[in-house]
Image (cartoon, grey):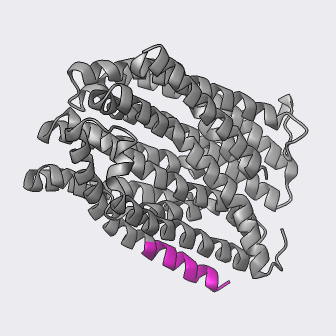
């Protein structure tokens, strides 16, 4: 990567990393969205509500995978930018070992707290039974859930964004086929959905690990690299911790929404919230793809001291991520009904509740992308404290709105807590980014 790149070269390099990453993230999002489509069509509102009640537990596992993948990947990319290739290999090998250890610890913690996590969301009856079925499989398969999240980030930071995309495509196609077999053909319900996802994630994890020991890898590993290095493990967790907090925040917020929707409404409203969340996830996957695709470029040029190039990639990242959110908001509002029909076209109560929630909950959709991008910007050059602070603020700002608005506005208050808090947090994130931007301008 040269410091003397013109505008066209910068754009080409940006899209070379971002397009495969966006495709990978969107395909990765299909793991959950496809589950939701099959469950909505073949089980109904109770099934959708159940998988939403189970999601906070899954979110913790996915966050752990993101923490390891983003942290180890960013460290390795920084070392490669500094020309320290042996160091980069050691950091990737450390990331693989750390992934296994974190998976074991996370599984044990969730085994102890899983039932409590379901009960505090006010789940009962069929919703609780379905959610238990899903969680039982999820916890058994926790190591591959982490691996399937971590591997693509590590591959992208190794200079193989297209291969990372194909890896996720293979997993997603596997998940779709197995969903059909287990849910539709065999009638295994949410247990089938969980098994299908776990098997697809296992395939992604195995192929990702195999890549790093192959001749295709730029940072090719040997068994000697598979050592836990406490300092690198600490730095990986520190850099990636904001990603864990982000998923932890989503888990807490989803759990609170579920509990409040069941308090002020019923399982149908939670099912509607599940569909709205799938639509939100599609945009977030796109925005995350843009941000994480640009992250290796930002990290590399920061490590190489090429600040002007780094800033150009940051501008492109924000323009694409936030602009796409504005476009998505318009499209979702114009085509709400046909989009909802993909998940369920027979339950009129579910469709009506989803249309209402969609227009309120996604009111400030594009700001979700902006907030995530700012966190990734700080992660990219190792400013883990600021990235973590944004994630903590994300949770701290939304929670008061979730407690204050529902007693006043009822169900509408639950729907509106997210967009209102996003407006507030975006102002804080923009101020932090502007201060950092001016600091770099002085270099």
- Seen at 26% across and 51% down, the residue is 355
Task: Name the quadrant of the N terminus.
Answer: bottom right
Across and down, in percent, residue 380 comes to 63, 61
Task: Identify the magenta region.
Answer: 430-443
Foreground of the two, 392 or 253: 253
| Left or right of 320, for residue 312 | right
- Seen at 67% across and 32% down, the residue is 204
Number of marks: 0
Residue that extends furthest to the right in the rendered view of this protein: 215
Magenta portion: prevailing SS class: helix
Specify whether residue 337 is in view. Answer: yes
Residue that extends furthest to the bottom in the rendered view of this protein: 442
Q: Quadrant of residue 305?
A: bottom right
Across and down, in percent, residue 130 comes to 33, 21
Across and down, in percent, residue 362 comes to 33, 58
Q: Is residue 307 above or below residue 121?
A: below
| Left or right of 163, for residue 402 | left
| Left or right of 197, for residue 428 | left
Q: Is residue 213 above or below residue 4?
A: above
Task: Name the quadrant of the C terminus.
Answer: bottom right
Foreground of the two, 226 or 268: 268
Specify whether residue 235 is in view. Answer: no
Foreground of the two, 6 or 98: 6
Q: Is residue 270 magenta?
A: no
Q: Is residue 40 above or below residue 378?
A: above
Across and down, in percent, residue 419 comes to 30, 61
Foreground of the two, 340 or 87: 340
Q: Quadrant of residue 99?
A: top right
Q: Is residue 440 magenta?
A: yes
- Seen at 8% across and 56% down, the residue is 408
| Left or right of 213, for residue 419 | left
């Amino acid at each position: 990567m040269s410091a003397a790149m013109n505008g066209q070269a910068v754009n080409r390099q940006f899209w070379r990393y971002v397009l495969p990453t966006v495709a990978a993230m969107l395909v990765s999002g299909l793991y959950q969205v496809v589950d939701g489509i099959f469950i909505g069509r073949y089980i109904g509102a109770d099934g959708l509500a159940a998988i939403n009640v189970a999601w906070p537990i899954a979110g913790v596992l996915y966050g752990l995978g993101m923490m390891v993948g983003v942290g180890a990947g960013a460290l390795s990319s920084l070392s490669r930018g500094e020309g320290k290739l042996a160091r980069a290999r050691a950091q990737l090998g450390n990331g693989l070992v750390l992934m296994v250890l974190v998976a074991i610890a996370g599984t044990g913690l969730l085994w102890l707290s899983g039932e409590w996590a379901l009960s505090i969301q006010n789940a009962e009856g069929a919703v609780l039974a379905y959610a238990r079925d899903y969680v039982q499989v999820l916890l058994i398969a926790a190591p591959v859930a982490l691996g399937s999240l971590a591997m693509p980030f590590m591959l992208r930071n190794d200079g193989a964004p297209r291969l990372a995309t194909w890896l996720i495509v293979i997993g997603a196609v596997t998940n779709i086929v197995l969903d059909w077999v287990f849910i539709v053909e065999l009638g295994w319900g949410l247990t089938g959905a969980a098994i299908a996802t776990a098997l697809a994630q296992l395939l992604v994890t195995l192929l990702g690990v195999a890549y790093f020991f192959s001749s295709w890898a730029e940072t090719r590993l040997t068994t000697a690299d598979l050592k836990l290095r406490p300092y690198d493990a600490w730095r990986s967790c520190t850099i990636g911790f904001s990603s864990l907090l982000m998923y932890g925040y989503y888990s807490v917020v989803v759990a609170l929404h579920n509990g409040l929707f069941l308090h002020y409404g019923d399982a149908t409203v939670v099912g509607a919230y599940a569909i709205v969340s799938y639509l939100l996830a599609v945009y977030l996957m796109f925005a995350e793809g843009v941000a994480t695709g640009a992250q290796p470029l930002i990290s590399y040029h920061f490590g190489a001291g090429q600040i002007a190039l780094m800033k150009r990639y940051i501008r492109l990242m924000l323009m694409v991520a936030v602009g796409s959110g504005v476009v998505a908001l318009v499209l979702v509002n114009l085509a709400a009904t046909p989009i909802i029909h993909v998940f369920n076209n027979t339950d009129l109560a579910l469709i009506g509740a989803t249309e209402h929630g969609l227009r309120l909950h996604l009111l400030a959709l594009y700001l979700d992308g902006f907030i995530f991008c700012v966190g990734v910007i700080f992660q990219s050059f190792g400013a883990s404290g600021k990235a973590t602070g944004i994630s903590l603020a994300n949770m701290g700002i939304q929670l008061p709105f979730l407690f204050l608005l529902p007693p006043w506005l009822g169900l509408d208050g639950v729907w509106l807590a997210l967009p209102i808090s996003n407006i507030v947090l975006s102002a804080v994130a923009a101020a932090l980014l502007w201060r950092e931007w001016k600091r770099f301008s002085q270099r």
